[in-house]
Image (tube, grey):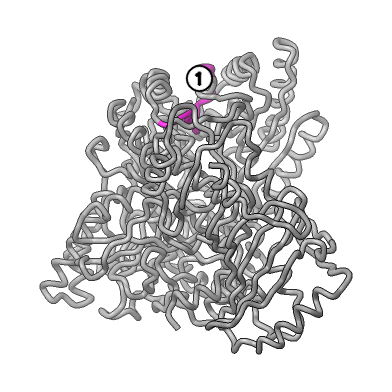
């Protein structure tokens, strides 16, 4: 499922919602679709534990009904973990997102580098004032930009079995960077054919709101409200 | 390393990895141990193209509905995936189970168009299955093929064990049941093929040998007494009772057509003389409105699609189609659903239908006059007058349509330069008419294909227009359209069309050429990014073969044709008659003239 693009995922969810025969609210205009939005697009190739979204209904639906019904209509590999009613005037999760936390685990295509090597590579990268990368921008054209400001935190995790990292990266409406792009910038690591997309397994653990140094998990915010 | 592990390393490195997952909603995963026979349908094009194919969905349903058999899917891997699969020795695998295609009992190719043939060979090779039928023993899967090209499959004959002509929803399960029975009897390869050749609609090419005299095809002889001299196609009589995909697979990525498809009827009674589909899918068989409504409801409930397409060869010909649309629009469950109605006639009734189903902004409406002059339209049997076109276009602009797409063909029999120039004149007259009578200036898009004479049509004896003439007339049309404002011109690649004609009218002598071309790197010949005429030309030259011998061959009515042993559905005398009438510029068959009970 991680191989679906954001648009594919939207279509998949919209169709599952239609199958569920719930009283969905549809957008107006020429191509009415269920009013569903996901908080932050998930780059292709990354699994996720706690994505967020919001949906509008035109009739009464309880969160439990919604979760149970939809889960029975989603393909394997995709599941709703919970839902809560929100007030109409609440900001949508998409507006709240400022950062995303990823766990990168060495995929084992080659022997893992020593933790020290990785730590040093990270330090070298983060100590640079600028990290210029070329990425495909909107419309497919190559765009050069500095991704250093998007990296809030990069920490090696205490090694249990596999070599793994936590990466807290900017996400949301003010721009962001894919963890793969960042990992491809690390030097001194074994070179794997296909780059970071093959060398590391990526998992998005959660979405965060806040700014600068202070980030709060959006989920815990909303749970707090309820 | 297991295939799953190998794919973990491959999928992040290819475009659209979701093409290779196989876990779509409604995909059927059956236990291989529990099935008495396991088949895989191999579609020789990309996932996105194959997933739009209705035939594949129908066969998937027909086989998987039965408990003792299973049918999975495999599509042509994209170029980037193929490179990785070859370098890492990952064999072609079926999507649902990821089992190697070479391990199935039957591999069935869907032959939708001639330029997919190199992909057929490529997929056999990727699967590790020997290319030639004669090289495959009982330990290998049976390799079958069906679809429109099965009506002249001779260029592929040495590579395929058996072809199915006609409707597959009853024939394929029947074939699989026979395979079970034959295996139980301990039948070897040859006995199996002999047994299967006795099933109606199946053609085992190794039991027939073509003859050539002085370099020309002169007939086919039977090598086995028990097989028919002429193979008749399979026809499902009752479409209401036939299997239909009520829970079609919902593709992960956007397929060319990503919507529920309801087949209104099969066959077509219009009688256009260039059209092979009109012959091979006859007689016309309809589904009842009740069945259609039921199927539509079930499909939408099972998929959540936002759009349903009412499909057929000529949808405005379905009786009371406007009432059907009205009923559907009123009854559909689950939120707003767009109804689309492709393949409409050129008349104001059809415009009314298009209007009935449109939602929101009206985009472009498509008409297919096919020829620029009334004379040539009579020759090809397309009974559309200029007045018809103007009336339909007028109705359309009044309703708010702002653009038209007009389909034409270059190279039709008896065509002259004037006929081609008249296409531009027709467009100008249409623009003038719409401006004067309605004050509208819709955008026009003219699309010109190249005529390919198809077997089993009244034009099967006609040669294709030579390449340099095609190019000249394409330039002529381009120049004639240039002064017109607001007209876009699209044309099909003349060289690709030449190759299409070669294979459409081809015989078994082309098989070595096909293999050579594939070995030289030809793949995805239907895609302009991959088609290389240079490579094909070199292959022809290397084998001392001339494409003109097939594409430009002009036949007499009593000449033997390489596809005579395959019955398309209309007696040759009728095709001859229609050919003669075409050359006399007589209009297409009228209802009263047609002696088949096909009229809708």
In the image, residue B179 lies in the stretch drawn in magenta: no
Q: Residue furthest left?
A: B185
Residue A217 percent across, percent down from the top left: 62, 55
Query: Taking A75 as reference, is A45 left or right?
Result: right
Q: Quadrant of residue A205?
A: bottom right
Q: Nearer the viewer, residue A201 or A101?
A: A101
Is residue B245 at least partly visible in the picture?
A: yes
Query: Taking B470 as reference, is A125 left or right?
Result: right
Pointer 1 residue: B356
Q: Quadrant of residue B467?
A: bottom right
Q: Residue at x 46, y 66 (%)?
A: B120
Segment tinted magenta in the rendering? B334-352
In the image, residue B338 lies in the stretch drawn in magenta: yes
Q: Nearer the viewer, residue B591 or B438?
A: B438
Element at label 1: helix
Chain assignment, label 1? B
Q: Quadrant of residue B581?
A: top left
């Amino acid at each position: 499922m991680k191989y679906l693009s954001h648009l594919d995922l939207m279509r998949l969810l919209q169709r599952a919602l239609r199958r569920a025969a719930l009283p969905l609210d549809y957008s107006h205009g020429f191509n009415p679709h269920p009013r569903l939005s996901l908080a932050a697009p998930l780059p292709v190739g990354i699994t996720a534990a706690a994505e967020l979204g919001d949906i509008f209904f035109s009739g009464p639906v309880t969160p439990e009904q919604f979760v149970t019904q939809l889960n029975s209509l989603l393909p394997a590999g995709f599941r709703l973990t919970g839902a809560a009613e929100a007030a109409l005037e609440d900001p949508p999760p998409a507006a709240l997102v400022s950062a995303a936390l990823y766990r990168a685990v060495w995929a084992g295509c080659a022997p893992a580098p020593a933790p020290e090597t990785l730590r040093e590579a990270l330090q070298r990268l983060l100590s640079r004032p600028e990290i210029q990368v070329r990425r495909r921008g909107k419309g497919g054209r190559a765009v050069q930009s500095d991704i250093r400001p998007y990296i809030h935190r990069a920490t090696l995790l205490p090694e249990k079995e596999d070599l793994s990292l936590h990466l807290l990266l900017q996400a949301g409406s003010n721009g962001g960077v894919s963890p793969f792009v960042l990992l491809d910038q690390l030097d001194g690591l074994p070179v794997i054919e296909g780059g970071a997309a093959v060398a590391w397994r990526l998992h998005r653990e959660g979405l965060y709101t806040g700014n600068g140094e202070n980030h709060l998990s959006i989920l815990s915010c909303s749970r707090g409200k309820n | 390393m297991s295939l799953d592990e190998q794919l973990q390393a491959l999928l992040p490195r290819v475009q659209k990895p979701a093409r290779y997952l196989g876990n779509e909603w409604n995909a059927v995963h059956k236990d291989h141990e529990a099935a008495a026979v396991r088949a895989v349908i191999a579609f020789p094009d990309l996932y996105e193209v194959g997933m739009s194919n209705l035939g594949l969905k129908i066969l998937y349903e027909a086989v998987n509905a039965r408990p003792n058999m299973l049918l999975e899917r495999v599509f042509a891997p994209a170029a980037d995936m193929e490179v990785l699969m070859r370098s890492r020795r990952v064999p072609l695998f079926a999507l649902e189970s990821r089992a190697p295609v070479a391990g199935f009992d039957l591999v069935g190719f869907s032959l939708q168009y001639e330029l997919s043939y190199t992909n057929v060979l490529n997929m056999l090779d990727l699967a590790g299955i020997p290319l030639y039928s004669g090289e495959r023993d009982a330990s290998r899967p049976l390799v079958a093929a069906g679809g429109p090209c099965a009506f002249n499959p001779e260029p592929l004959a040495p590579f395929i064990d058996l072809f199915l002509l006609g409707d597959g929803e009853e024939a394929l399960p029947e074939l699989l049941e026979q395979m079970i029975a034959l295996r139980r009897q301990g039948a070897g390869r040859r006995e199996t093929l002999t047994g299967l050749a006795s099933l109606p609609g199946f053609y085992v090419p190794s039991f027939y040998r073509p003859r050539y005299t002085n370099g020309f095809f002169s007939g086919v002889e039977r090598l086995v007494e028990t097989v028919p001299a002429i193979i008749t196609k399979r026809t499902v009589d009752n479409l209401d009772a036939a299997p239909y995909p009520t829970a079609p697979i919902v593709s992960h990525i956007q397929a060319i057509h990503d919507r529920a498809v309801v087949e209104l009827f099969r066959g077509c009674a219009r009688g256009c003389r260039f059209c092979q589909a009109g012959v091979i899918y006859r007689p016309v068989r309809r589904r009842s409105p009740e069945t259609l409504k039921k199927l539509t409801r079930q499909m939408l409930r099972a998929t959540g699609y936002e759009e349903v397409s009412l499909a057929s060869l000529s949808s405005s010909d379905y009786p009371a189609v406007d009432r059907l649309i009205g009923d559907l629009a009123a009854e559909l469950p689950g939120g707003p659903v767009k109804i689309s109605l492709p393949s409409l006639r050129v008349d104001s009734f059809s415009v009314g239908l298009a209007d009935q189903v449109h939602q929101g902004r009206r985009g472009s409406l498509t008409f297919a006059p096919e020829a620029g002059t009334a004379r040539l339209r009579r020759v090809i049997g397309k009974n559309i007058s200029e007045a018809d076109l103007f009336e339909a276009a007028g109705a359309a602009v009044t309703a708010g349509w702002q653009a038209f797409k007009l389909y034409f063909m270059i190279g039709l029999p008896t065509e002259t330069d004037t006929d081609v120039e008249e296409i531009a004149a027709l467009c100008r007259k249409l623009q003038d008419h719409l401006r004067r009578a309605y004050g509208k200036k819709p955008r026009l898009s003219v699309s010109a294909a190249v005529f390919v004479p198809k077997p089993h049509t009244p034009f099967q004896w006609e040669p294709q227009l030579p390449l340099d003439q095609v190019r000249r007339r394409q330039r002529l049309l381009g120049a004639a359209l240039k002064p017109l404002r607001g007209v876009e011109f699209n044309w099909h690649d003349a060289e690709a069309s030449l190759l299409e004609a070669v294979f459409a009218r081809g015989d078994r002598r082309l098989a070595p050429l096909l293999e050579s071309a594939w070995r030289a790197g030809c793949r995805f010949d239907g895609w302009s990014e991959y088609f290389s005429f240079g490579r094909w030309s070199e292959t022809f030259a290397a084998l001392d073969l001339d494409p003109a011998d097939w594409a430009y061959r002009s036949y007499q009515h009593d000449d033997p044709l390489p596809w005579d042993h395959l019955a398309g559905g209309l007696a040759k005398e009728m095709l001859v008659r229609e050919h003669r009438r075409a050359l006399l510029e007589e209009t297409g068959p009228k209802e009263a003239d047609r002696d088949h009970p096909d009229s809708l």
